[in-house]
Image (cartoon, helix red, strand yellow):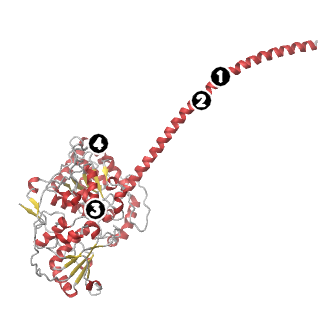
């Protein structure tokens, strides 16, 4: 019984096992088919996901590269190592905004400027300017001023000029006038090395020596070096070394005749060391005034390699190869752009551009003693810079002999920030598409200061953007030669705007455009004192009122007035001796 039951049980087990096996086989086939489909689907999804992942990764890499490149460009363009020997670390600062409300109003208003955008909107009154014409290049013999002009020279004048390119230019022209006054030979001036500009360039690296000597030959005798019998003299030991401390600023001709001339006759040589603004503009004999203008506006020509790269710079900014004005001819010589060779040129008319000299470099900011909302770090950094480069100013601060930042701002002694410059240009009606060449570009605070400007005016370029590294390489360590390129780009611009009328570059460019511009070289000169007063109402003033007051401020500066006594002829050449009125 047990065995039979066992047999029956065993048979049933085998039956159910067999049935289960069949089911398992069927399930296994269906499962395998399902698994195959699943694997195929997973493979397809995985492949598509890989493509998406790879694409995303490539886009990320490209985006990162572009950001890095743009960041590098911004750092190259705006952030310049500060010359602070104490090596205070300069952090990458957050954006600095001083006038948030006005900036917002400017952002809202700038799009409306596009409709009526005309870049040359602030020309000087033609009926006032057309009667003035350049005339300092006319042949002129220096009159017999006190000592007489004879073939026998009184001696040799050496000049060592300090400062940057444009300060040295003024010193050279003043030295020419003094040499003519004292009937002396002028040795080609030397340029002193500056701890601020750090440039070893000499006269012949920037200006054409032979042209300079030849052009002025009827007015003053210029030689390249002292004669051999004077080269071994210890000029300081014989008492012929005259420093800036020995000469009062803007001395009259009488000083040179009474003090320097006897010394020149006695020793045969005088060395002006650090010679800058040591010759007064008034009173000065008419012929000597004329000679200074002749030197500045005609005799100082840049060397061919500066002219060549300057011409290339201007052509690329304009996106055109033609010469547009007399300024091109005087600044670029034989490298002046020529008319396009084909009428099928893709660019039928040149791009018009505004050149802006943003005088907001560290030396200017530190010297101004103004506050720019940079906090304690900024104050420490600027103070450290002053202690190294402006020790006299540092002593004035310690003795409480200086103005407070608030007083300086109210008197218009603070340089305009990029933010203030952008708001001003917007108020003057310039649209966001305005093509702007930025001179200098060594902006203190770097990108943090420039962001507010570039948001309103994205089409900002510098020589570093326009020229290739290989084209700039010969000028890389020579700030004066780079400044010469900026001078060319600013002087030949359709409009030149400055943020500080007291800077040498702005002053000389302004004068050059007046002298050679033939009434078609407008310059925007803000009155910083008035502008500071307008900006002081930034929390309440409406944009319409702000715009009208800024425009009135600039338009009133466009009036042609006679050069006041003591003002610079290099900046304001409409004066007898420089320009003639018909």
Q: Position of residue 301 (x, y in %)?
A: 22, 65
Name the residue located 83 percent from the left edge and 16 percent from the top edge. 14
Specify the label residue 33 is tagged with. Answer: 1
Distance CA(mark 1)–CA(mark 3) = 79 Å
Mark positioned earlier in the residue sequence (2 or 4): 2
**Residue under label 3:** 306
> Which circle's residue, 1 or 4, is located before the other in the chain?
1
The span from disc 4 to disc 3 (Cα, nearest Å) is 41 Å
**Which sits in the foreground, 554 or 273?**
273
At numbered mark 2, what does the secondary structure look like: helix, strand or loop?
helix
Q: Position of residue 325 (x, y in %)?
A: 17, 54
Q: Which residue is mark 2?
A: 42
Q: Quadrant of residue 516?
A: bottom left
Estimate the spatial distance between the alpha carbons at disc 1 and disc 2, rounded to whole Å: 14 Å
Badge 4 element: helix
- The answer to which of marks 3 and 2 sits earlier in the sequence is 2
Closer to viewer: mark 1 or mark 3:
3
Q: In the rendered structure, find residue 336 and report the number of the disc placed on it.
A: none
**Residue at (64%, 25%) from the top-left corner?**
36
């Amino acid at each position: 019984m047990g065995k039979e039951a066992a047999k029956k049980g065993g048979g049933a087990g085998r039956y159910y096992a067999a049935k289960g096996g069949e089911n398992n086989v069927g399930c296994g086939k269906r499962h395998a088919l399902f698994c195959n489909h699943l694997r195929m689907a997973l493979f397809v999804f995985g492949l598509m996901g890989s493509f998406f992942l790879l694409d995303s990764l490539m886009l990320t890499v490209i985006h990162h590269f572009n950001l890095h490149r743009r960041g590098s460009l911004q750092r190259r363009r705006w952030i310049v190592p500060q010359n602070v020997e104490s090596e205070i670390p300069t952090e990458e600062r957050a954006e600095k905004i001083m006038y948030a409300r006005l900036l917002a109003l400017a952002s809202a208003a700038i799009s409306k400027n596009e409709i009526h955008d005309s870049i040359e909107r602030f020309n000087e009154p033609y009926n006032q300017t057309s009667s003035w014409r350049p005339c300092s290049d006319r042949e002129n013999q220096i009159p017999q001023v006190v000592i007489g002009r004879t073939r026998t020279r009184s001696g040799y004048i050496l000049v060592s000029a300090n400062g940057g390119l444009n300060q040295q230019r003024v010193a050279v022209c003043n030295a020419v006038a003094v040499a003519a006054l004292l009937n002396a030979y002028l040795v080609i001036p030397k340029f002193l090395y500056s701890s601020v500009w750090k440039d070893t360039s000499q006269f012949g690296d920037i200006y054409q020596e032979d042209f300079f000597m030849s052009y002025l030959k009827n007015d003053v005798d210029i030689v390249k070096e002292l004669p051999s019998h004077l080269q071994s003299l210890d000029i300081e030991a014989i008492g012929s070394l005259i420093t800036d401390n020995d000469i009062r600023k803007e001395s009259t001709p009488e000083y040179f005749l009474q003090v320097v001339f006897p010394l020149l006759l006695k020793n045969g040589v005088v060395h002006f060391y650090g010679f800058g603004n040591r010759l007064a503009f008034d009173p000065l004999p008419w012929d000597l005034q004329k000679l200074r203008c002749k030197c500045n506006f005609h005799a100082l020509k840049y060397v061919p390699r500066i002219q060549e790269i300057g011409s290339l710079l201007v052509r690329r900014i304009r996106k055109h190869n033609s010469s547009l004005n007399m300024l091109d001819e005087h600044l670029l010589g034989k490298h002046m752009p020529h008319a396009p060779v084909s009428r099928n040129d893709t660019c039928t008319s040149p791009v018009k551009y505004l050149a802006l000299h943003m005088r907001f470099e560290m030396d200017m900011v530190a010297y101004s003693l103004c506050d720019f909302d940079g906090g304690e770090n900024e104050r420490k950094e600027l103070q450290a810079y002053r202690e190294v480069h402006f020790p006299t100013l540092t002593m004035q601060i310690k003795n409480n002999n200086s103005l407070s930042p608030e007083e300086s701002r109210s008197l218009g002694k603070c340089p305009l920030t990029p933010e203030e410059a952008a708001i001003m240009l917007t108020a003057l009606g310039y649209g966001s598409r305005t093509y702007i060449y930025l001179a200098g570009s060594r902006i203190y605070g770097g990108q943090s200061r420039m962001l507010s400007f570039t948001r309103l005016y994205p089409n900002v370029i510098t020589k570093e953007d326009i020229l290739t590294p290989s084209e700039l390489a010969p000028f890389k360590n020579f700030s004066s030669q780079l400044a010469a390129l900026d001078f060319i780009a600013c002087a030949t611009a359709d409009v030149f705007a400055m943020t500080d009328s007291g800077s040498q570059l702005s002053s000389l460019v302004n004068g050059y455009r007046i002298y050679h511009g033939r009434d078609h070289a407008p310059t925007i000169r803000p009155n910083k004192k008035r502008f500071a007063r307008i900006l002081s109402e930034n929390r309440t003033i409406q944009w319409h009122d702000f715009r009208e007051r800024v425009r009135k401020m600039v338009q009133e500066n466009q009036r042609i007035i006679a050069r006041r006594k003591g003002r610079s002829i290099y900046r304001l050449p409409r004066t007898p001796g420089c320009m003639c009125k018909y």
